[in-house]
Image (cartoon, rainbow, N blue to C red):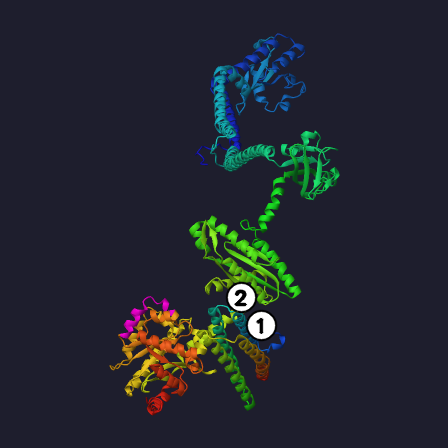
């Protein structure tokens, strides 16, 4: 706080000294003035001397009337009286001998004057005595005068004898006298000046005291009172070391201190206020929260009350002594408290209680009663109560002792009672629903699983066989799509009943859902027994159904079977395996069953391995072509050769196609192998041409190759790469002609190939799937009679008839006929006679590699005996 | 046509070479199924696919065994045994190929004769020939390790 520049009060001791000094100075001034007044003017001294003369004259007069002065007691009295005058220093009556007769002092009677009186002037005394006149002697200091006056008894000086008279001695104090005189003379002015000086001094002192003491004190007082009132920043502003300055500074410092404390206090106040506000806010929040809570609680309580009042469950509270504290309407109703007017509703002879199993239950056994006595919780106890108005009701009762703290003493008991009559009623239905299919009434997946577990266990123990059959209806989706789900459901019910009719008593038929069923055949002897049952199932299920008034005959069933313990797995896996087998059955044409192969993985592994092996063999060029010549029946000339594939297996040796072709037929690697064969055969044909042999090359192709949409383009491309400009012909031999049905426009393909000098043969004609119908539909240029007919033709007349018929067909349709497997001369002769066009077989040559074939070709001459006619 | 119980690979038929035993088990299953299919006059497609499987698997299996033979048969005596072993394989394959061809041509198949061959072959082969091979393999593997 800035301190104003204020005159600081002087030190008190200075003030005091000053005041004392003033007093002293005033005093001195007064003294001086008095002194001046005494000393001057001379008129005053003259007046003094006059006074002394008058005094001494009065004494002369008084004494002179007496005749004998010395004896006069009067005289002594008079002198003594005169001695009372303050200015009279010493008054004495001296006798003629110069001795003191009387004096103002009694002690010196009859003493010589010059001994007693110090300034006694013997000359003046002699003079006064002798001259009879008054001598005045003035002391050198001027302070007193000494008067010597002659005293005669007549009072007339001249009458007395000169030099015989007494002398009066008077020492008169001039100063005292002067003062007295001044007092008298200057009484008024003296008083006035004294008064003035005193007033001035007083004023000065007052002013000083006021200015230097009172004012600062007031200031300090004011400051203190302002500070006390709480004015901030007031200060006396005093500086210095004087007492008041120190006091002021002390006050200032106190003020500052208070100020600082006040600021701190204000700060603290603010802080406190802030905290108070925060706390208040917090409290308000808390209050709001609590209010809300209270409200929520109230609402909750109301809700709970409402809930308790409206729930059908019965809820009751009891104290630890078993007195009923509260029971909601539900409780009262369920336990018939109103009807019987007693606390729990079942006094003696009131309502009948039964246990869950239907046995009578005494009141003492009632769970609430029991808990009230033993304080143990009871939950989910099901009790039947015979109620007077609504008959038998089933309730589930929970009784729970309540403790204030966990594990503490029981303070009460809560009991709840729910009506589970409907639940109980539905329990059987639920049980039914849980285990049986709602539509067909057959066991469902859950029950099936249970049964399977039992059966697997039994089968294992008894060392029997359990067949798990997974069945799926074929064509069911069509029924659903065409006639709707209701009709489909009807069909499922019918199918279910057929299943049940086909199996033995004790076998399980279950529905898994949709059109999937499972049959468990327990205790079967062997697969035959299982199959006979399945055949019955298949044939029964494939009978026509009446669906929505229509006869539907397309519904069949596909089944997959797995046998336990051959497939030694858990029920779920057994089901899955049977399911897999069922899919295999579906894939291979439906309306059949498939056995699950427990070693499917091994099988797939083997198949993969074989395919990998063949792929490797292709890249390693392990596949080679052997050639078997085709001989013209007419003249025995070599007109062509059939290329036959051989696998020069590194381990197994040379394998004929029958050993490995079946493995690749259904796989795309067949295409690669087929391409390889065509390529190799064409290269060989070109080589022969270049060596001067024009031979038609017969190439066996896979049906799969022909099914490729770009087969013709690819063949043309290969031909263009190989061709040398000279024409050579190719004959594509088709084994599985049935597969050609899958080709959209086979005749067009044949025509396109003809343009490239590529012809087709139907291989193995007459066997298997090569039927007359194929001959009509497939425009192949040649028919190859299968070796099996040729082998037996001499001994088997049927074969001969077949061959003749084939040759006849070939002629009729304009097809060339080629006989395979000709091994004897007799066969040759017969075939020639029958009109066969060409032949091949061991009689002429076995299949040979290209080198051997060429050698054979160069050495070949038709046997003269065979072709002479 | 009489029914015979399916073949079972029991303890006595195990060679001790795990790979071979696995393959035998599978070969046996295939024979059983082929057997069953032929016996029940099952669909030709089904039977053919089974026979094809059998053929393919026998090639796979023989490949395994013959590779092992080539690897382990070192002495003249062992090589002579190996040749016999291989010829048994060829005989089996031929019969299966013949079966396959007959199925393709829809010729008569003497099922009883075929099955007795197959079961006889597999019994003899597995119990005698392959056990000898396994003995040789295990012996060599032991001496190698």
Image coords of residue A656 (percent x, y)? 43, 81
Chain under numbered label 2: A
From which residue to which does the magenta span run?
A: A739-754
Q: Residues within 10 Å of mark 1 (few under 14, many from 20)?
A: few
Q: Disc 1 is attached to a residue of which chain?
A: B
Position of A611 compared to A421: left or right? left
> Image point 44% across, 50% down: which residue?
A483
Up the image or down, B13 lies above or below A518; here it is below
Q: Which residue is mark 2?
A: A596
x and y percent of residue A633 in the render?
33, 84
Local secondary structure at mark 1:
loop
Q: Nearer the viewer, mark 2 or mark 1?
A: 1
Magenta-span inclusion, residue A740: yes
Q: Give me the C-alpha separation between circle 2 and circle 1.
A: 23 Å
Q: Is residue A406 above or below residue A211?
A: below
Q: Which residue is mark 1?
A: B2
Q: Position of residue A319 (x, y in %)?
A: 70, 35
Mark 2 nearby-residue class (10 Å; few <14, some 14–19, many ≥20):
many
Q: Is residue A650 visible?
A: no
Toward the viewer: A222 or A325?
A: A325
Left or right, A68 with respect to A130, comes to right
Are the residues at dot 2 and dot 1 in contact (C-beta closer than 8 Å)? no
Q: Is residue A163 left or right of residue A693?
A: right
Q: Is residue A733 visible?
A: yes
**Quarter of the image where one finds residue B122:** bottom right
Q: Quadrant of residue B85?
A: bottom right
Task: From the viewer's side, name the closer residue of B143 and A491.
Answer: A491
């Amino acid at each position: 706080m800035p301190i104003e520049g204020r005159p600081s009060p002087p030190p008190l001791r200075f003030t005091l000294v000053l005041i004392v000094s003033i007093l002293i100075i005033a005093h001195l001034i007064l003294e001086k003035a008095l002194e001046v007044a005494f000393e001057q003017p001379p008129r005053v001294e003259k007046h003094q001397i006059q006074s002394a003369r008058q005094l001494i004259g009065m004494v002369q007069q008084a004494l002179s009337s007496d005749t004998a002065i010395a004896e006069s007691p009067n005289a002594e009295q008079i002198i003594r009286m005169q001695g009372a005058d303050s200015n009279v220093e010493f008054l004495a009556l001296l006798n003629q001998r110069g001795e003191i007769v009387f004096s103002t002092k009694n002690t010196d009677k009859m003493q010589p004057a010059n001994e007693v009186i110090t300034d006694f002037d013997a000359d003046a005394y002699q003079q006064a005595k002798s001259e009879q006149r008054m001598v005045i002697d003035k002391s050198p200091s001027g302070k007193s005068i000494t008067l010597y006056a002659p005293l005669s008894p007549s009072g007339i000086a001249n009458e007395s004898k000169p030099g015989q008279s007494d002398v009066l001695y008077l020492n008169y104090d001039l100063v005292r006298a002067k003062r007295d005189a001044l007092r008298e003379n200057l009484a008024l002015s003296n008083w006035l000046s004294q008064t003035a000086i005193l007033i001035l001094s007083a004023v000065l002192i007052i002013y000083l005291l006021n200015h230097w003491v009172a004012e600062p004190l007031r200031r300090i007082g004011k400051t203190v009172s302002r500070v006390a009132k709480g004015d901030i920043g007031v200060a006396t502003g005093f500086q210095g070391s004087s007492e008041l300055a120190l006091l002021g500074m002390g006050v200032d410092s106190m003020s500052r201190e208070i100020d600082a404390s006040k600021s701190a206090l204000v700060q603290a106040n603010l802080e406190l206020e802030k905290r108070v506000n925060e706390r208040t806010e917090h409290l308000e929040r808390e209050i709001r929260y609590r209010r809300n809570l209270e409200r929520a609680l109230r609402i909750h309580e109301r809700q709970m009350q409402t809930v308790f009042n409206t729930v059908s469950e019965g809820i009751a509270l009891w104290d630890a002594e078993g007195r009923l504290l509260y029971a909601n309407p539900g409780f009262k109703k369920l336990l018939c408290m109103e009807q019987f007017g007693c606390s729990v509703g079942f006094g003696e002879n009131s309502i009948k209680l039964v246990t869950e199993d239907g046995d009578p239950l005494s009141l003492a056994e009632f769970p609430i009663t029991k808990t009230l006595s033993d304080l143990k919780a009871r939950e989910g106890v099901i009790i039947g109560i015979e109620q007077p108005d609504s008959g038998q009701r089933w309730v589930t009762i929970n009784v729970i002792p309540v403790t204030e703290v966990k594990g503490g003493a029981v303070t009460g008991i809560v009991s709840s009672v729910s009506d589970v009559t409907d639940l109980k009623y539905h329990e059987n239905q639920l049980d039914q629903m849980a285990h049986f299919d709602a539509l067909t009434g057959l066991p469902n997946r859950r029950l099936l699983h249970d049964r399977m577990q039992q059966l697997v266990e039994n089968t294992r123990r008894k060392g029997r066989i359990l067949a798990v059959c997974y069945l799926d209806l074929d064509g069911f989706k069509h029924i659903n799509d065409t006639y709707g789900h209701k009709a489909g459901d009807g069909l499922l019910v019918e199918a279910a009943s057929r299943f049940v009719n086909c199996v033995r008593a004790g076998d399980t038929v279950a529905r898994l859902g949709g059109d999937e069923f499972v049959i468990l055949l327990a205790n079967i002897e062997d697969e035959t027994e299982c199959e006979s049952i399945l055949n019955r199932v298949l044939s029964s299920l494939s009978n026509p159904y009446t669906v929505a008034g229509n006869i539907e005959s397309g519904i069949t069933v596909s089944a997959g079977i797995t046998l336990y313990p051959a497939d030694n797995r858990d029920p779920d896996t057994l089901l899955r395996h049977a399911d897999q087998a069922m899919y295999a059955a579906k894939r291979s044409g439906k309306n059949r069953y498939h056995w699950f192969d427990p070693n499917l993985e091994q099988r797939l592994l083997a198949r993969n391995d074989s395919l990998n092996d063949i792929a490797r063999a292709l890249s390693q060029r392990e596949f080679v072509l052997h050639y078997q010549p085709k001989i013209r029946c007419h003249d025995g000339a070599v007109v062509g050769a059939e290329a036959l594939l051989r696998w020069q297996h590194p381990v197994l040796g040379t394998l004929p196609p029958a050993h490995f072709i079946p493995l690749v037929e259904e796989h795309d690697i067949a295409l690669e192998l087929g391409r390889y064969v065509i390529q190799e055969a064409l290269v060989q044909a070109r080589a022969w041409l270049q060596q001067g042999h024009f031979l038609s090359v017969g190439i066996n192709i896979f049906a799969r190759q022909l099914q490729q949409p770009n087969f013709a383009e690819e063949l043309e491309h290969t031909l263009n790469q190989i061709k040398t400009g000279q024409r050579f012909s190719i004959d594509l031999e088709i084994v599985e002609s049935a597969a050609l049905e899958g080709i959209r426009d086979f005749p067009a393909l044949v025509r396109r190939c003809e343009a490239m000098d590529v012809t087709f043969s139907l291989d193995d004609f007459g066997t298997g799937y090569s039927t007359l119908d194929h001959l009509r539909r497939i425009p192949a240029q040649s028919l190859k009679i299968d070796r099996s007919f040729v082998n037996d033709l001499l001994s088997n007349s049927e074969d001969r008839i077949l061959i003749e018929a084939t040759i006849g067909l070939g002629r009729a349709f304009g097809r060339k006929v080629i006989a395979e497997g000709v091994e004897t001369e007799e066969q040759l002769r017969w075939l020639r006679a029958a009109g066969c066009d060409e032949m091949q077989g061991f009689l002429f040559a076995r299949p040979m590699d290209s080198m051997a074939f060429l050698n054979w070709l160069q050495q070949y001459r038709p046997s003269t005996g065979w072709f002479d006619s | 046509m009489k029914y015979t119980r399916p073949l079972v690979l029991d303890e006595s038929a195990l060679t001790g070479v795990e790979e071979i035993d696995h393959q035998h088990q599978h070969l046996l299953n295939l024979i059983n199924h082929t057997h069953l299919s032929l016996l029940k006059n099952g669909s030709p497609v089904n039977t053919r696919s089974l026979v094809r499987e059998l053929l393919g698997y026998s090639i796979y299996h023989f490949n395994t065994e013959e590779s092992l033979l080539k690897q382990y048969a070192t002495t003249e005596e062992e090589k002579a045994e190996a040749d016999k072993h291989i010829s048994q394989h060829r005989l089996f394959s031929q019969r299966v190929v013949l079966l396959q061809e007959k199925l393709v041509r829809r010729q008569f198949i003497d099922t009883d004769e075929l099955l007795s061959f197959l079961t006889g072959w597999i019994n003899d082969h597995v119990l005698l020939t392959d056990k000898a091979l396994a003995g040789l393999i295990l012996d060599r593997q032991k001496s190698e390790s």
